[in-house]
Amino acid sequence: MRRAVMIIAPMAALAACSQPEVPNKAPAPPAEAAIAQTVSIESTASPTIQRLVPEFKRTEPSNGVIGYGRDGDTVTLTFLVGGNPDGAATAADCMLQVRGPQGHDDVVRGIVVPSVTSTGAITKDDIGPDPLQVDVMIGPEGAQVTDHGAASKLCGMGVQVDGFYKRVSTPE
């Protein structure tokens, strides 16, 4: 009996430590509020992503590609990223789709939208009530991605969306 307590107590402590902290959420800045109005998660159908044509690619800190699509003023970016290499503890690939307007500064300020991919589905419930924002500055050499918490919420531990992705093809 004592041995069982010695095993369970550390496991309970580990489980308590691994629970994510829920920070106090400050009101969204006007830019994030505008994004939420521009691309509504509720109005977005869950597209099935059957094929990804990479427009941008990276190899560090892990492999990743970005597909680019445009429909009027709305840009759709599809990310397929791997976990940071860590042997048997390497996280599985993660695929997510971001949609939003591309500003005059060439930055797409997008939010993650529900989608169905070969690596799984991301639902409205997975995303939660607050939009998950990803900013992508697109230039002639590539795309610089700034993730505002999407990968940590939707992907395995060790997966990063942030970073520089080199352009695969020449810009139009």
Image (cartoon, rainbow, N blue to C red):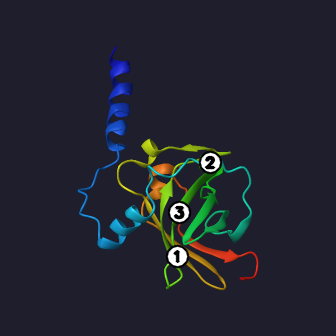
Q: How many marks?
A: 3
Q: Callout 1: few (<14), some (14-19), or many (20+) C-alpha neighbours within 10 Å? A: many
Q: Which label belongs to residue 102? A: 1
Local SS, label 3: strand
Q: CA distance from mark 2 to mark 1?
A: 30 Å
Q: Which mark is residue 92?
A: 2
Residue at coordinates 57% horizontally, 68% vertically from top-left? Answer: 75
Compared with 32, 83 (above or below) is above
**Label 1, label 3: how far apart the Cα atoms are:** 10 Å
**Residue where numbered disc 3 is placed:** 99
Q: Amino acid at mark 2?
A: Ala
Residue 145 appears in view: yes
Q: Earlier in the sequence, mark 2 or mark 1?
A: 2
Choose between 84 and 126: the one closer to the eye.
126
Mark 3 or mark 2, which is nearer to you? 3
Residue at image location 43% in from the left, 42% down from the top:
125
Q: Provide residue 105's location: percent of width, then percent of height.
A: 49, 85
